Image: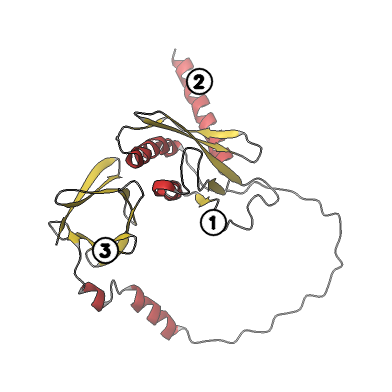
C-alpha cells in the first residue's frame, strides 16, 4: 500500500510539472471584448475584470479590441484564447477554458457559481469563483525553443563601429525623478473635499465623470466605475471588487487573501 501511495505521489508531481512546462510556453491570453451571453461589448465591465484578474497570475492578457502585441503567434503559437461556457438562470455558472492556436483545450477551470440576483454581481461572483482554479498553476513564461533553417545566406557586410555617444550628467535628472516619486499628491488636490469617506477616514471617494476616484489617505489607488446594471466595479492597486449604493452611502465588497472584506463609505 505504501508503494502504491508513493507511486501515485510521484505520478502526480510529474504530471503537475508537465502541465507547468506546457503552460510556460504561452506568453499571452486573449479575452473577447464581448461573449455570446453579453448584450454589449464589455458589459458590466466584465471583460475588463477578466483581464485584470488574469494579470494577477502573471499572464499578459488583452481584450481582442485592444492593440495586440507584434510578436503574437509569430514563428510559434504563444497565445491562448479564453473561452467561457456560461449557463444557469436563477444562478450563474461559468467554466473558463483556454485554447491554443489549433483549438485544443489546454486548461479547464472548475465551475464557478454566482448566486446574487443581480446579473452583474452574479457574473463577478461566478468569475472570481472559477478563476481560483489558476491558484494551482505555477506560471512563468519561458519561450519554446524554435529552430529555423535559413534558406538564404546573406552576404556578410563590414560591421561599422557606432560612434561614441555623448556623455550626459544624469545626477540632476535622477534626483528630480526620485523627488517626484516621493510626492504622494499635489497640495491642491489634498484640499478638495471628498464625497464619501470611511468612518476612520482611511479610504475616501471623490466624484468623477464615470463614477468615483478611490483614495487611501491622500493617495489615489483606483477607480469605482458604474456599470449599466447599476452597481460599480472597483479596480485598485490593492484589490478588485464590487460596489453598490446603500441607504447611508456606498459599500465595496472584495476578497483579499481568501477573506471577504467590506468597506463602507458614508456621505460627507
User: What residue would you read off at disc 3?
Assistant: 207
Image coordinates of residue 172 in percent, x first then y, are 42, 85
Instruction: Answer left or right for 186 relative to 73.
Output: left
Does label 3 or label 2 sit earlier along the sequence?
2
Nearest to the observer: residue 55 or residue 128 = 128
State the quadrant of the N terminus: top left
| Residue at the top extreme of this rendering | 1
- Mark 2, Cα crowd under 10 Å, few <14 / some 14-19 / many 20+, is few
Nearest to the observer: residue 172 or residue 197 = 197
Q: Secondary structure at mark 1?
A: loop
User: What residue would you read off at disc 1?
Assistant: 66
User: What residue would you read off at disc 2?
Assistant: 7
Q: CA distance from mark 2 to mark 1?
A: 47 Å
Residue 70 shows up from this direction: yes
Q: Are marks 3 and 2 in contact (CB under 8 Å)?
A: no
Residue 25 shows up from this direction: no
In the image, residue 126 sits, relative to residue 28, either above or below, namely above
Residue located at (47% from left, 41% from top): 138
Amino acid at each position: 500500500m505504501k508503494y502504491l501511495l508513493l507511486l501515485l505521489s510521484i505520478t502526480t508531481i510529474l504530471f503537475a510539472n508537465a502541465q507547468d512546462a506546457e503552460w510556460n510556453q504561452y506568453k499571452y491570453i486573449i479575452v473577447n471584448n464581448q461573449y455570446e451571453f453579453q448584450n454589449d461589448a464589455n458589459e458590466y465591465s466584465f471583460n475588463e475584470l477578466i483581464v485584470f484578474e488574469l494579470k494577477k497570475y502573471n499572464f499578459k492578457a488583452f481584450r481582442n479590441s485592444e492593440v495586440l502585441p507584434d510578436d503574437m503567434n509569430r514563428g510559434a503559437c504563444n497565445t491562448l484564447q479564453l473561452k467561457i461556457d456560461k449557463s444557469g438562470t436563477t444562478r450563474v455558472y461559468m467554466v473558463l477554458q483556454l485554447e491554443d492556436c489549433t483549438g485544443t483545450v489546454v486548461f479547464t477551470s472548475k465551475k464557478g457559481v454566482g448566486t446574487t440576483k443581480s446579473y452583474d454581481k452574479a457574473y463577478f461572483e461566478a468569475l472570481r469563483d472559477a478563476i481560483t482554479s489558476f491558484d494551482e498553476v505555477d506560471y512563468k513564461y519561458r519561450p519554446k525553443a524554435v529552430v529555423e533553417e535559413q534558406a538564404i545566406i546573406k552576404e556578410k557586410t563590414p560591421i561599422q563601429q557606432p560612434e561614441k555617444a555623448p556623455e550626459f550628467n544624469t545626477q540632476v535628472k535622477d534626483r528630480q525623478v526620485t523627488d517626484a516619486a516621493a510626492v504622494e499628491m499635489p497640495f491642491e488636490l489634498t484640499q478638495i473635499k471628498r464625497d464619501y469617506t470611511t468612518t476612520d477616514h482611511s479610504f475616501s471617494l471623490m466624484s468623477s465623470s464615470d463614477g468615483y476616484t478611490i483614495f487611501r489617505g491622500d493617495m489615489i489607488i483606483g477607480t469605482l466605475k458604474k456599470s449599466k446594471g447599476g452597481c460599480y466595479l472597483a479596480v485598485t492597486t490593492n484589490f478588485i471588487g464590487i460596489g453598490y449604493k446603500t441607504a447611508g452611502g456606498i459599500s465595496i465588497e472584495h476578497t483579499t487573501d481568501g477573506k471577504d472584506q467590506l468597506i463602507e463609505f458614508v456621505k460627507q
